[in-house]
Image (spheres, rainbow, N blue to C red):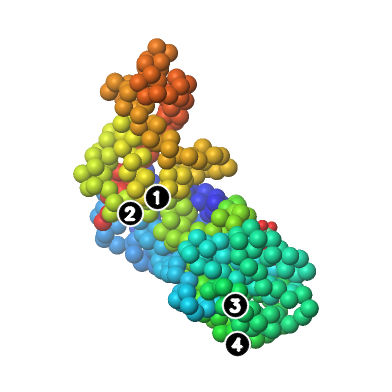
Amino acid sequence: MFESLQDGLGSALKSLRGQGKLSEANMRDGLKLIERSLLEADVSYEVTRTFMSRITEQAVGEAVLKSLKPSEQVVGIVYKELVDLMGPVDHSLHLKGKDEVTVLMMCGLQGSGKTTTCGKLGRMLISRDRKPLLVAADLQRPAAIDQLHVLGEQIGAPVFSDRTTQDPVAVCNNAVKEAKKLGADTVILDTAGRLHIDDELMGQLGRIDKRCSPDQVYLVVDGMTGQDAVNSAKAFNDALELDGVIMTKLDGDTRGGAAISVKEVTGVPLKYMGVGEHLENLEEFHPDRMAGRILGQGDMLSLFEKAQQEFDQDEAQRLEDQLQKGEFTLDDFLKQMRQIKRLGPIKKVMGMIPGMGAMLEGTDALDGAEDDLKRLQGVIHSMTPEERRTPKIIDASRRRRIAAGSGVEPHVIGDLVKQFEPMQQMMTAMAGKGMGDRMKMVRQ
Ligand code: GDP
């Protein structure tokens, strides 16, 4: 995700690193590189200019020049500014009580992923114990009604449609009126899209808005379309007063610039993001995570922030010291897995670590990870301290002994050792890049 922006900023920041102290002059060079990366990533010219002047203002000055690690401070400043640009985000859908009907109106250009997102939202609502009703008011695209019915069936939600009329305002209005009778507490209006913004579309959406008074109006934009997504967000917001933007297709090789610009240009927050074609591929939008990703640090920064609150301070300090020394053993791995588990489902948390997301993509490597963890615990406990420190020494006879002790097949031990090696290398390599310092920087 956001590869090109990441690559660009990554190389810009790399050139800033390792230059010792920043002088005003070489910081300017670095900032120029960052500026170019943003423009290349399709961040609009105006947004880039505002962003760069904010950064320069903050970075040029004593605080940065005095620091021993100025390049890291620049990363910190760029990071904070990116977070500010894209945030703050309120993920709430502002649902009313279940005895009332909440109306969510979805709009967007054709192909943006609007209908799919209606299904994803419906699924999310059901998981939150709400009863959604999907409303097929996209009478523009012939297949949209059928598509919504299929989605409704998949998520187990009723779908309201009326093939006898060409009037989407009536469809929406009737659906809202019928919602209660159909047992629904949340109505999701899938309105019509067009290939381009035109007056007819805006007029139609305006009429639906007026007639049905939706509680929330969300725009779905295709993250892959870069600047076009920003332009359409601006036009829709002028016509409808949006409450939020959902950006789709952020799973592909998107340029990322749109995510940065939309909030700055429209003032409307990105609330959620679509990260795949499947119905479960809808995630809350977190500016800090996105900024971390854009800076090529994965979700490490927000992971650390979250970890900071959860982790026992001593343990965190111990890990920091240990990683800085380049040590990472099976015991640490086990402790980390336990700590990480407290942050959320293992697969999701592991995916936030730089490099891991790509490694895990499309694999089922961590499915059933929670059960595996228990098994792993047994296996690691059956090892000697020496084996935990240096798993490479585990030969066939040791494998058999550990397997007998922990009640698993010997090959499980072999697999664990094989899987652990690259992880150990990655952890020590990250520590070499000053991960501990980055953690400290975030704490300040
Ligand atoms: P609509 O015309 O706006 O209603 O668009 P659709 O919901 O029909 O989506 C258009 C295409 O985009 C479909 O092929 C969807 O599967 C795909 N799509 C929607 N959301 C995402 C997403 O988050 N990621 C990816 N990769 N594809 C998506």
Three-letter amino acid code at the position of disc 4: Lys
Q: Residue furthest top?
A: 397
- Would residue 161 appear left or right of 355 to someone viewing this image? right
Three-letter amino acid code at the position of disc 3: Lys
Name the residue that disc number 4 marks. Answer: 210
Q: Do the residues labelled 2 and 4 touch (CB within 8 Å)?
A: no
Per the model, the C-alpha gap separating discs 3 and 1 is 38 Å
Name the residue that disc number 1 marks. Answer: 344
Per the model, the C-alpha gap separating discs 2 and 1 is 14 Å
Q: Mark 2 vs mark 1: which is more N-terminal?
A: 2
Q: Which of marks 3 and 2 is in front?
A: 3
Q: Residues within 10 Å of mark 2 (few under 14, many from 20)?
A: some
- Would residue 332 appear left or right of 163 to someone viewing this image? left
Residue at (27, 41) in percent of width and height:
320
Q: Are marks 3 and 2 in contact (CB under 8 Å)?
A: no
Q: Mark 3 vs mark 2: which is more N-terminal?
A: 3
Residue at (59, 57) in percent of width and height:
279
Per the model, the C-alpha gap separating discs 1 and 4 is 41 Å
Disc sitting over residue 181 in the figure: 3
